[in-house]
Amino acid sequence: MNLDASVASRMANIALGHVAREYPNKLDHVLLGDEDALPPRVLHPIFFGSFDWHSCVHGWWTLLTLRRSFPQITEVVAITALANETFTQDKVAAELAYLDRPLSRGFERPYGWAWLLYLHLEAVRHADSWGTELEPLARAFAGRLGDYLGILTYPIRVGTHFNTAFALILSLEWADAFDPELAALIRDRTRHWYGTDRDCQAWEPGGDEFLSPALIEALCMARAHKALFPIWFEQFLPRIAAREPATLPSGSCNPCSRTPVDTAQPASGSRSGARPRVSSMPSRTTGRVSRSTSPIASSSPVSAGVHRGPETGRGPGSGSRWRDGSRAASMETSSPMRRRGADASSSACRAADRAGRRSGAVQVAAVIVAT
């Protein structure tokens, strides 16, 4: 299915039908007393629809993206009117106030945070004042993301809302435009966490996953480290030219197309110390990859993604030592990307078919970088 004006109109009508529909609603809300039992519209005067907060955020991203991409559809009038009514200074202030609640620190982390940044990135592409109004909220979430990346020991690799790589794909594009310091931190952390991942086993999908953990990690690395990505990818999925691992592909007509990746289409767009030696066995944390040295391995002293030291069985917490004597320091991402994930995967396989087994991974990497 191609995204033409007819499809865009249908999608816009769907989103218009739920972004301002308050119920049913699943709140991410901690109550400290009876006074906190408030309806969604009071707690979140902008993002109270679409069943939950983050769905309302990316519902709005859908609407604004369709408005910009298909200005000729009749729904543009309704989108504009609703956005003018919704994105106001008072309502943004109320959303900000919610973040200041004592137990709201982890509210919608990290999926909702990334989508809010991506919504702001889309909003500034419009001549209206929506981007200006939303910027304080985007800055607040960017600050939280920076703090979170500074204390997150291991990336979260599950193919659900908690996936770190997916959140960083969206956040990096925003940060490149608005926050160079956060962009540098994202690149540092992705290189550190994923830079030595190799020979991915792709034990997926899980029963509740809507992302491919392997492919979303690859896309994250392609976005964050474009120049070095082909080298990394050849080690991460070294047998992709042979369509292995077999668990990664799905679908009978195209064995390299897999379950849709997620719901965003990006628009465009260090610490030092010796790394501890790590085991070549699959990580107990991820269950998906082996870890070894890599041309883009981070110089950070943390053993990212590995729970235990390979010889001692001790975690890389403060003061623990590896057998070779090195010290492990303690430190604490029906939509365009669904199509993009499938298209990139099938294009990757076609490239791999044309290439040989040896050069296949490099060819696939070039396809991913080009998407």
Image (tube, helix red, strand yellow):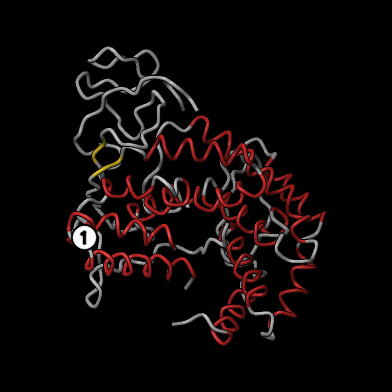
Q: Is residue 61 above or below residue 269?
A: below
Q: Is residue 320 visible?
A: yes
Q: Is residue 36 above or below residue 103?
A: below
* Nearer the observer, 199 or 96: 199
Q: Percent x, y for residue 43?
A: 70, 53
Q: Tell whether 60 sits left or right of 344.
A: right
SS of the residue under disc 1: helix
Residue receiving disc 1:
241
Q: Percent x, y for residue 199?
A: 22, 45
Q: Tell whether 319 sits left or right of 118.
A: left
Q: Where on the picture, by quarter, is residue 364?
A: bottom left
Q: Percent x, y for residue 292?
A: 25, 34
Q: Is residue 28 visible?
A: no
Residue located at (30% from left, 30% from top):
307
Q: How many numbered discs sit on the rendered protein? A: 1
Q: Crowding near pointer 1: few (<14 within 10 Å), some, many (20+)?
A: many
Q: Tell whether 112 sits left or right of 125.
A: left
* Nearer the observer, 273 or 337: 273
Q: Where on the picture, by quarter, is residue 4?
A: bottom right
| Quarter in which the N terminus is drawn | bottom left
Residue located at (32% from left, 52% from top):
214
Residue located at (22% from left, 50% from top):
238
| Quarter in which the C terminus is drawn | bottom left
Q: Percent x, y for residue 169?
A: 49, 51
Task: Name the kind of residue labelled 1 in the image.
Answer: Ala
